[in-house]
Amino acid sequence: MAMAARSFRRGARDIRDPGVARVALLAALPFVLGLAADLAVYVTVRDQLPDRLARHFGGDGEADGYVGHGGFLAMLVGMFVVLGAVGVFLVLRSDFATYRRGLRGLLAGVYATSAFLAWTMGASLVANRGTADGAAAVFPLWHLAVAAGIAVLAAGVGAALSRCVPLPDTRSPLGADGQVGAERIDLGRDETAGWVRRTGSWVLSGMGIAMAVVGIVTLWMTDDGWLAPLSLFVPGLLIAAFARACVTVDRRGLTVSPGLVPWPRIRLRLDRIESADSRQISAFADYGGWGYRIAPGRSGVIMRSGEALVVRRANGNDFAVTVEDSATAAALLNALVDREAPPQEGRR
């Protein structure tokens, strides 16, 4: 059983390999085009720009932060390169790359982000055009509404382009319904066994890193103090820190703890568990997203779509954690639950 699960994972990676270059190209394309468009705007209006450019505008559209031409270009290139790298990283490393709906959502977000950034940065250059100094520049707030509309259109383009990527069949080879039966490991009464596996989400890691980077960029761009940058930087670090988890099955039951810190952790004792199995799940369709999720009749630590250990609790609710080799974990957990139960209540 464990060998079959491992073979399936190797096969899934082999199937995805031919589309890796195409996925990376589609993820990087909007940032390349956005950067090229803004550089074209800069070249076009360069002779009409002041030596000191307004780089940040307040809520009233008035300039409140300034930078030279070299600094502006460095900021422009840096933002597109960093966000583009994060976008490519998310698309390539996320298990959503094996799901049409998940890939569509990721590419839509990547294209929307690039389009919004490209319009606002280009509009800030136009706002500086014809002024003697950046202090006289005014950024009309209607540009933000236009940028949002263009981002929506770009998201549609990204979603449509996801159909250009060949994806493998996502049905589990372990069963027609994607669910493994309640298998058990042959475990003697006096034998001790344990199972430990680390799991994580490259999507959450990327989101956390991106938020932290944006927080640093915001600190550099704004003169309004530390509050706004910290409101991005600190949550970004927390998201990245909790994007990994350690899953353990042993005589104490099932334990899920953060990968970097010992708390908070979730533990389901053996006497609180009825059975366990392995399933293929979709993070959005089944649980509404990533992280610790609560839905009617079920909860879980959802790091990605794909293989998950699903435990039926004594109260009838399900608890899931997305982790590789979940079939082995389920078989061991079922064996431990059976051994813990009184003889007349055994499930053998």
Image (cartoon, helix red, strand yellow):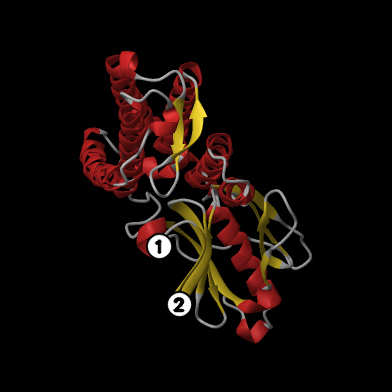
In this view, the residue farthest toward the right is 190
In the image: residue 87, left or right of residue 254: left
Mark nearer the N terminus (2 vs 1) = 1
Callout count: 2
Relative vertical location of residue 258 with respect to residue 339 in this rendering, above or below: above
**Amino acid type shown at disc 2:** Gly
The residue under the point 44% across, 32% down is 135
147 and 87: which one is in front?
Answer: 147
Residue 297, numbered label: 2
139 and 5: which one is in front?
Answer: 139
- Displayed quadrant of residue 217: top right
Task: Give x and y (percent) for residue 113.
Answer: 36, 40
The residue under the point 35% across, 24% down is 35
Residue 309 visible: yes
Q: Which residue is mark 1?
A: 288
Residue 25 visible: no
Task: Give x and y (percent) for residue 276.
Answer: 54, 67
Relative vertical location of residue 320 with respect to residue 25 in this rendering, above or below: below
The residue under the point 63% across, 78% down is 272
**Amino acid type shown at disc 1:** Gly
Task: Give x and y (percent) for residue 281.
Answer: 41, 57
Relative vertical location of residue 17 with respect to residue 62 in this rendering, above or below: above
Neighbours of disc 1 within 10 Å: few (<14), some (14-19), many (20+): few
214 and 139: which one is in front?
Answer: 139
Q: CA distance from mark 2 to mark 1?
A: 14 Å
